[in-house]
Amino acid sequence: MNEKTAIFAGGCFWCMEPPFARLDGVIKVESGYTGGTRENPTYEQVCSGATGHYEAVRVTYDEDRVAYDQLLDVFWRQIDPTDADGQFADRGPQYRTAIFYADEQQRRAAEDSRKRVARLLGKEVVTQILPAAPFWPAEGYHCEYYKKNPEHYSRYKRGSGREAFIDRLWGKNALKQRLTPMQYEVTQHGATEPPFRNEYWNNRSPGLYVDVITGEPLFTSLDKFDSGCGWPSFTKPVDGRRLAEYPDLSHGMVRTEVRAKVSRAHLGHVFDDGPNGMPRYCINSAALRFVPLEKLEEEGYGAYKALFDKE
């Protein structure tokens, strides 16, 4: 196990615990306070707005099973990153959003992810990226509130406006508007696009292939090859922690389905007939967006340029 921690402020910490807790590879999620001037503050002191603290969660995770980038993707999908004065019905400095980085690697990943979110939303993102400060655990009754008081938690999340906002931005209707009909059918219903009549099957340009929904990096042109099947084929993903595999017995066949862990989008299937004994990830173009090498830095994928420098 390779244990790491990450700290995120996303408004009310009650609502920030569950999304991280359900992510495979997360060990523990703690509610607390950070970024302020007073040691070991109480909830009442933080709520006064006078201590400078943020309500936050500290995520302890196994880096061998889940990447920091995945935690960032989960974080962005829980908040309104364009609101500088709080989150939803909760107003005040303690409810501002921020990412607290532990080292330079986390800082760079957070900066890049903020660029990608701004591009996706087409709006200015005001979420702060700050060096990690002392984290003070919250009072026990706040911890795992969604488990201890599920009915009140559900009413609060709905009543605050957070639930409706997330649904407007990431729900099925939002995806229908943002995606093409083919992209929607492939990612949400497991459809398969026609071979040889899709966007990337014969794309030979250098670059990165990302999740069409979240922008999460999935594959690179360095691992792409012509399998003759008519769909984009890769020998490996950028990071296996970002993919989930499931048995697929549909259409009278035995196959292994591949999905993106964060967006849960259907991507395609993986087979054992790749070159030199390697796998063949047979992926629908409709599940991907291609970012050319020359635009990686501009679009928030600058950290991946080093992969191409090795060639």
Image: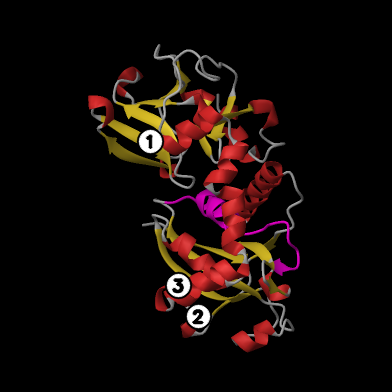
**253 vs 137, nearest the viewer:** 253
Marks 3, 1: nearer the viewer: 3
Residue 66 x %, y % = 44, 51
Do the numbered discs 2 and 1 sit on residues whose CB atoms are within 8 Å? no
Residue at 54% x, 49% y: name it: 171
- The label number, if any, that marks residue 298 in the structure image: none
What amino acid is labelled 3 in the image?
Tyr
How busy is the neighbourhood of tag 3: few (under 14 within 10 Å), some, or many (20 plus)?
some
Provide the secondary structure element on which disc 1 rests: strand
Q: Is residue 191 visible?
A: yes
- Residue 217 lies in what quarter of the image? top right
Q: Quadrant of the C terminus?
A: top right
Of callouts 3 and 1, the N-terminal one: 3
Q: Is residue 60 visible?
A: no
Residue interval drawn in magenta: 66-86
Give the residue at mark 1. 258
Residue at 59% x, 59% y: name it: 164
**189 vs 210, nearest the viewer:** 189
Q: How is the image coloured?
A: secondary structure
How busy is the neighbourhood of tag 1: few (under 14 within 10 Å), some, or many (20 plus)?
many
Of callouts 2 and 1, the N-terminal one: 2
- The label number, if any, that marks residue 142 in the structure image: 2
Give the residue at mark 3. 146
Residue 229 x %, y % = 39, 14
What amino acid is labelled 2 in the image?
His
Question: Is residue 79 on the magenta stretch?
Answer: yes
Do the numbered discs 3 and 1 sit on residues whose CB atoms are within 8 Å? no
Q: CA distance from mark 2 to mark 3?
A: 9 Å
| 161 on left or right of 61 | right
